Every structure is written in C-alpha cells, then in structure tokens.
Image (spheres, grey):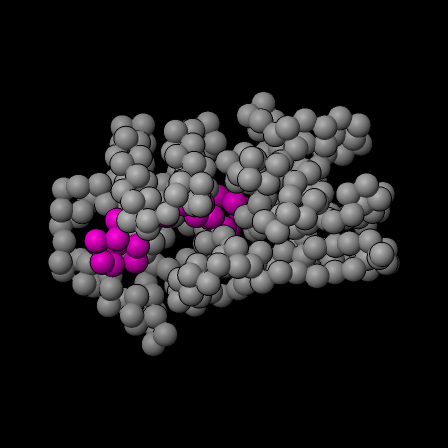
C-alpha cells in the first residue's frame, strides 16, 4: 500500500480511472481534485486498486473510489473502511452494490450537485425563469459586449476579473475559492479546462471555466463576473451553453456547500436534478 499527496504527476492515472467511471459527480474530475487538494487534504492511495483519501467540508475523513463501483469493488471498499470509516461520494445508482454489506447510507443537502438541462440554461424557458430572460434582455440592451474563448492570450484579463470579483464581494481571499480559481486560470491547458471571457463596454467583465465531466455533462468549476454589470451571469451562462458540443445535454453547477446565498442563487435557475452524493459508513 502506498499513499502520496495528490500532485500533477498523478493526472494520467487518475484521469484514466475517472474516464472509465462516467460519473456526473463534480468530484470525479482531476482538475477539481487537484485545485482543492489543500482544502480537502487529497491523497492518492494505491493498493490493488487506487483511491482518493480526503476530508469533506465538514472535516470528515473519507475514502473515494476512482474505479467504477461494482459488487467486487464494493467489497474491497468495505475492507478499506476498517481504516477509513467513511466512503464518499457515492451515486445513488450504485448503492445497490452495497446493500448486502450492512452499511449506513446518508447524504447532506449541501453536497448535492445542481444539474440543469443545456436547453434550460441556453434559453431560460417558462414562467419560472422569466426573471432570467428579462435580465438577459436588459444586459443585451444596455451594454456593448463581446465574448471570446478563454486562452493564453487573455488569461491576464481573467485574473483581473477575479481580483475585481474578490473586491466586489468584500471577503478575504482565504474565505473564497480565489486561490483555486487563480491556479485554474494559470494551469487551464495543463488541467484540460475550457471556458469563455466576456468583455463589457470594452473592459474585462466576466468568465466561465470548466470541462466535460462525462459523455453528456459539462461542469462549470468557476464563474466570476463584475457585480456592476447587471445580467452578465445570465448572458455568460446562456451564450456558453449554446456553444457547447452537441453531445453535451446537461450542465453541472456543482454544490452549494450548505451556504444559503449559493443555494438561493443555484436554485433560482430551477435545477432538473439535485445529484445526491451518498456517504457510506460501517455500523458503529
């Protein structure tokens, strides 16, 4: 058995296992794991199979399977849970593999990923999303704007937006995902991230950054915009969604971390699914 702190040299092996998993859970991304390696104390455990060791946002130690969960891997996980008593995150569709193993199942609402259809984010259809449509319309009428692919040529502008966003919200850098987002911008090619940057009235206004998470799902890891441009987020989400590859049917906005402001913001887009991430524990 070998345990190492997660680093860039693990990208190939972790990405290969994640690709076999086809999970829509946002943690099943090397970029996500790497960028939040300090927050969650991520380590790679190599035995007969490979696993991630980490800590949840509420500081619970856990083991995370990287290979697809099968009845055989479920039994192997149970053996590891003698030392790492919490297994997380597990999709509801795989829970049946654990039913004969006498485990306790639970989930926290703050862990759940917000999943939306691509069409919903592209067009904001229906009565419940009329405010989003209005904000989008107001943005287009009020401002001059242009959107570009986020690249090496405009990374500096994205970093400027990030700093201005941090000033806008009035929080310390260690209270937000500022450090992870800054690293994501600087390492976007290395981490296989893609995104867009929006210029509003000839100044850097906002950007999105994410990746294809599975065959049909794109995850947005970071979305940052200047508060003074009303409707900017609605424009960026809609415009970016329309330009995604045809195979992408869903967009994952990740979890709300149990923060009320994030819950209100993400719920306002009317998610099609709250993707639960189950925690499995041995009986006490």
Count of picture labels: 0
Residue 230 in which image quadrant: bottom left
Tell me if residue 225 is in the magenta stretch.
yes
Q: Residue furthest top?
A: 9
Percent across and percent down for residue 265 are: 40, 62
Q: Seen in the image, is 204 located left or right of residue 249? A: left
Note whether 4 is above or below 104 in the view shown.
above
Image side of residue 245 versus residue 79, left or right: left
Give me the residue at 43% from left, 45% from top: 176
Residue 275 x %, y %: 57, 59
In the image, the segment drawn in magenta is 212-234
The vertical placement of 205 against 101, above or below, is: above
Residue 205: tell me if it is visible: yes
In the displayed structure, would residue 3 be above or below residue 176?
A: above
Which of the pair 84/201 is nearer the observer?
84
- The answer to whether 187 is drawn above or below residue 246 in the figure is above
Q: Look at 62% across and 60% down and name the residue there.
A: 108
Quarter of the image with the C terminus in it: bottom right
Residue 282 percent coordinates (x, y): 82, 53
Looking at the image, which is closer to me, 208 or 242? 208
* Residue furthest to the bottom: 127
Examine the rendering and report whether any part of residue 119 can be seen. Answer: no
Image spot of residue 46 (x, y percent): 74, 30
Residue 81 is inside the magenta segment: no
Q: Residue at x 18, y 47 (%)?
A: 200
**Rendered image quadrant of residue 197:** top left
- Kindly identify the residue that appears in the image at 78 percent across and 30 percent down: 47
Of 128 and 1, the residue lying toward us: 1
Quadrant into which the N terminus falls: top right
């Amino acid at each position: 058995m070998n345990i190492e702190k997660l680093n860039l040299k693990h990208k190939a092996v972790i990405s290969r296992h994640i690709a076999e998993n086809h999970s829509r859970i946002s943690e099943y991304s090397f970029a996500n794991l790497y960028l939040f390696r300090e927050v969650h104390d991520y380590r790679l455990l190599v035995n007969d199979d490979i696993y991630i060791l980490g800590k949840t946002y509420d500081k619970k130690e856990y083991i995370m399977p990287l290979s697809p969960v099968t009845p055989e891997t479920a039994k192997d996980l149970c053996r590891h849970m003698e030392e790492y008593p919490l297994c997380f995150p597990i999709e509801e569709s795989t829970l049946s593999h654990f039913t004969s193993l006498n485990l306790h199942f639970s989930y926290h609402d703050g862990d759940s990923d917000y999943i939306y259809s691509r069409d919903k984010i592209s067009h904001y259809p229906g009565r419940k999303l009329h405010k989003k449509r209005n904000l989008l319309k107001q943005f287009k009428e009020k401002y001059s704007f242009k959107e570009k692919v986020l690249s090496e040529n405009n990374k500096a502008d994205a970093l400027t937006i990030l700093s201005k966003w941090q000033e806008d919200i009035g929080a310390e850098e260690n209270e937000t995902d500022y450090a992870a987002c800054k690293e994501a911008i600087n390492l976007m090619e290395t981490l296989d991230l893609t995104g867009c940057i929006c210029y509003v009235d000839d100044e850097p206004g906002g950007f999105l950054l994410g990746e294809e998470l599975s065959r049909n799902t794109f995850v947005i890891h970071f979305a940052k915009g200047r508060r003074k441009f009303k409707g900017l987020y609605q424009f960026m989400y809609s415009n970016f969604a329309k330009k995604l590859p045809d195979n992408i049917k869903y967009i994952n906005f990740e979890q709300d971390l149990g923060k009320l402001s994030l819950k209100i913001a993400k719920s306002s887009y009317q998610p099609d699914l709250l993707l639960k991430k189950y925690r499995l524990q041995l009986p006490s």
